[in-house]
Image (tube, helix red, strand yellow):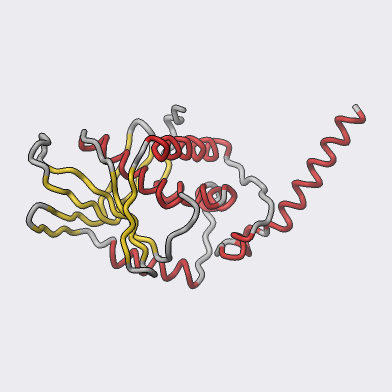
């Protein structure tokens, strides 16, 4: 599962990958982007949150727009917020608690949790302490959802990072079948899933026909 030494994966790419592999390739391989009302709203929310700075309260300090990276996993990006919670038993005296801000509401997919867990893996490597949990804040619901970084989620996260490395190394945009999620994707007019999926079906049919004839 060791990533290629020449490539680094953006933390945000993991959420794109788990939503749709084709979307991830369009954004991170072909560098395509198209904004709609939802993505614009999310961008404005993050612009308010991601202003670098910090504040402190008794037993806690909060850092905003924190740069993160993991040399082991070759992944990097920015955390919206990292709350450092006072723990005198630790050598540094503080334990990181990442918080990722999302525009919408809780989703059935674990893409948001994987992105947050990747932040935790970076923080563990950077600070040399275990980061057992963090939180997702959903703007539409105005509530914070705790996320426990258990063994299953950590494995899912490292697998997603490895998949994204492989996608970047292939430099290909895979064809995927049209799905209900396509209607909510801002890249749908660029992606054209109904066209590309059809092309893939024709290619597979011709390949099978050639194999049978051969």
Q: Quadrant of residue 184?
A: bottom right
Between 43 and 179, the one nearer to me in the picture:
179
Pick whichever, 38 or 110, lies toward us. Answer: 110
The relative height of residue 93 versus residue 79 in the rendered view (above or below) is above
Q: Position of residue 180 (x, y in %)?
A: 63, 61
At which x and y percent is residue 99?
Answer: 29, 54
Which quadrant holds residue 8? top left
Furthest-right residue in view?
Answer: 213
Residue shown at the point (82%, 36%) measured from the top left:
207
Residue at horizontal 38 percent and vertical 40 percent from the top: 75
Instruction: Using residue 11 as the reference point, say whether residue 199 is left or right of it.
Output: right
- Measured as percent of width and height from the top left, residue 211 is found at 86, 30
Q: Relative to residue 29, is residue 73 drawn left or right?
A: left
The reply, left or right, for residue 132 in relation to residue 6 is left
Q: Which quarter shows the C terminus?
A: top right
What residue lies at 28% left-to-right and 64% top-to-bottom? 49
Q: Residue furthest bottom?
A: 37
Residue 20 drawn at (x, y percent): 56, 51
Which residue occupies 9% across, 58% down?
A: 57
């Amino acid at each position: 599962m060791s990533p290629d030494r020449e490539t680094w994966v953006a933390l945000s790419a993991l959420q794109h990958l788990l939503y749709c592999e084709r979307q991830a390739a369009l954004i991170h391989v072909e560098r395509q982007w198209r904004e709609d009302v939802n993505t614009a709203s999310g961008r404005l929310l993050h612009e308010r949150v991601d202003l670098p700075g910090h504040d402190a309260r008794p037993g806690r300090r909060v850092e905003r727009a924190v740069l993160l990276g993991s040399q082991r996993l070759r992944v990097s990006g920015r955390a919206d917020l990292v709350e450092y919670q006072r723990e005198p038993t630790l050598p540094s005296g503080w334990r990181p608690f990442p918080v990722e801000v999302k525009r919408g509401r809780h989703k059935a997919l674990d893409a948001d949790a994987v992105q947050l867990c990747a932040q935790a893996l970076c923080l563990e490597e950077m600070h040399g302490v275990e980061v057992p949990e963090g939180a997702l804040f959903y703007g539409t619901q105005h509530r914070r959802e705790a996320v426990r970084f258990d063994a299953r989620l950590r494995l899912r996260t490292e697998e997603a990072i490895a998949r994204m490395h492989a996608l970047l190394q292939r430099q290909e945009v895979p064809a995927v079948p049209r799905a209900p999620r396509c209607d909510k994707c801002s890249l749908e007019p660029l992606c054209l899933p109904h066209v590309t999926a059809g092309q893939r079906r024709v290619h597979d049919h011709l390949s099978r026909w050639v194999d049978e004839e051969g």
